[in-house]
Image (cartoon, rainbow, N blue to C red):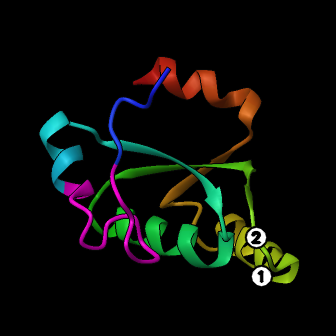
């Protein structure tokens, strides 16, 4: 099955010059579930932009990776210890709970 909608990401953040923010607002989306590569670069940039835009952010921690193990672990520590008021960390087994809560 093809994706419902594809948005090109021309920079680290999925929000930068992509139209993602407008698309999400038009659909009334208030919560983002974030997965991806480069935990300490692209994921971080997208998460910070989402928080700045007022989205609830849910990070699926076992659906992240990075080419830098040290960078990945550093960001996971920051997400757990410094950003717990802005984001929720879950694992993929808990994802169905997030879908039902919407």
- Residue under the image location 59 percent in, 22 percent down: 97
SS class of the residue under badge 2?
Answer: loop
Instruction: Please say if 2 is above or below 46.
Output: above
Indicate the position of residue 68 as horizontal and vertical percent values: 81, 80
Q: Which residue is mark 2?
A: 66
Q: Is residue 40 left or right of residue 6?
A: right
Image quarter of residue 91: top right
* Residue 5 among magenta residues: no
Query: Residue placed at 70% from the left, 75% from the top?
Result: 75
Q: Which residue is mark 1?
A: 71
Q: Mark 2, residues whose alpha carbon is within 10 Å: few (<14), some, or many (≥20)?
A: some
Left or right: 97 in relation to 47: right
Residue at horizontal 62%, vertical 74%? Answer: 82
Tell me whether circle 1 and circle 2 mark residues in contact (CB < 8 Å): yes
Quarter holding residue 30: top left
Q: Position of residue 44 (x, y in %)?
A: 55, 73
């Amino acid at each position: 099955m093809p994706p419902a909608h594809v948005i090109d990401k021309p920079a680290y953040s999925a929000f930068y010059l992509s139209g993602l923010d407008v698309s999400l607002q038009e659909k009334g989306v208030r919560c983002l579930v974030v997965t991806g590569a480069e935990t300490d670069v692209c994921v971080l940039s997208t998460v910070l932009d989402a928080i700045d835009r007022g989205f609830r952010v849910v990070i699926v921690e076992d659906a992240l990776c990075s080419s830098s193990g040290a960078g990945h672990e550093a960001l996971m520590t920051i997400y757990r210890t410094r950003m717990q008021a802005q984001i929720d960390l879950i694992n993929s087994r808990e994802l169905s709970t997030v879908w039902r809560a919407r």
